Amino acid sequence: MRQLSSLVARLPYPSQTVQRALAVAAIVTQGGIGVTGSVVRVTGSGLGCPTWPQCFEGSMFPVQHPEYHALTQWIEFGNRLLTGVVGIVAALCVLAAWRILLDHPSRTRLVKLAWAMPAGVVAQAVIGGMTVLTGLLWWTVAIHFLASTVLVWLAVLLLHAFGEGDERPRWRLPASGRVLLVALVAALGGVLVAGTTVTGAGPHGGDPDTPRLQAPIETLAFVHGSLLVVYLVVLAMLGMQLLRTGATPTLWRRYAVTWLVALAQGGLGSLQYALGVPEALVSFHVLGSALVIVATASLWCAARDRGPAVSAAPAGAEPQVSAAR
């Protein structure tokens, strides 16, 4: 470990711009891999590579095969390759956080969040392998998606961690407001889980022969939509709390963006259902879910203050302190 630390110490200290760019890249890649995964599903390419970690027995790459169309092979294989991009970005986040830690030993929380990125990539690779080896059973696909949602949330926390301190969080909301914020996150979790059941019973299973969840899709869609209504009601209650107690401009901006994204996602979901779940709208809906997560996580971060960042510059240099207020 000491040898690794000495190698990391030779790296240039990451500027604030680099820190932010890496964290934004983590958000984009963690959310983007979910979108490309939906493309695999709606094109029926989930078993284009029927084995794991190889594409075919004895080959890491697609090969000509009478039972598997070349296009579906390459769609699935391309999604697997994107995992490598996610892994590279995750590794760069760790290196940046580690380099910062060497100059600022108090930044352990930042390093833990950074390490969550490659750990998530490994976990997703294992879950993805399980998904393929079980023939794309709907609940394995659901776990695969839900793991991505957690990683998107953590990537947003990482972005904010680069630009804030490590003090005990001081909430900008009263106790009742914090309860509403926790309820908002719980409602979002419910919406996402319910959405996976709708997908599990829907027409896009990733492969024509994949068993589907045997439940009325109308009922599942109603539950999914009802939980979104709960999310919006809690969001409205949070807004009334902000009006009574006051809020920073940043918090109000995050709140407004959360409303816009959530309403757009709800409208898209309703359109998707009314049109019979066309393939293109499925991927846009997955993208929308990632944006709702990003907006909600950003609202969460704006609701508390961890003090100014102490790692904007190397130890001994004049720091350019910046913190969201």
Image: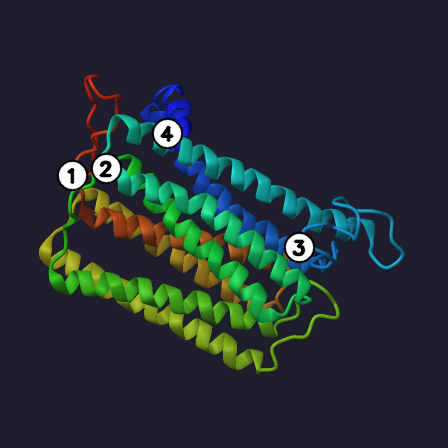
Is 33 situated above or below 24? below
- Taking 53 as reference, is 168 left or right? left
Residues marked 1 and 2 touching at CB (< 8 Å) = yes
Camera-side mark, 1 or 4: 4
Camera-side mark, 2 or 4: 4
Other residues around mark 2 within 10 Å, as few (<14) / some (14–19) / many (≥20): many
For the C terminus, the image quarter is: top left
Report the number of numbered marks: 4
The residue pinned by badge 2 equals 164
Quarter location, residue 114: top left
The residue pinned by badge 4 equals 2
Is 215 situated above or below 207? below
Quarter location, residue 207: bottom right
For the N terminus, the image quarter is: top left
Camera-side mark, 3 or 2: 2
Residue 62: x, y in percent?
78, 46
Taking the spot 76% from the left edge, 44% from the top edge, the residue there is 61
Taking the spot 68% from the left edge, 44% from the top edge, the residue there is 78
Secondary structure type for disc 1: loop
The residue pinned by badge 3 equals 40
Residues marked 3 and 4 touching at CB (< 8 Å) = no
The residue pinned by badge 1 equals 307
Secondary structure type for disc 2: loop
The amino acid type found where label 4 is placed reads Arg
The amino acid type found where label 2 is placed reads Glu
Q: Earlier in the sequence, mark 2 or mark 4?
A: 4
Camera-side mark, 3 or 4: 4
Q: Earlier in the sequence, mark 3 or mark 1?
A: 3
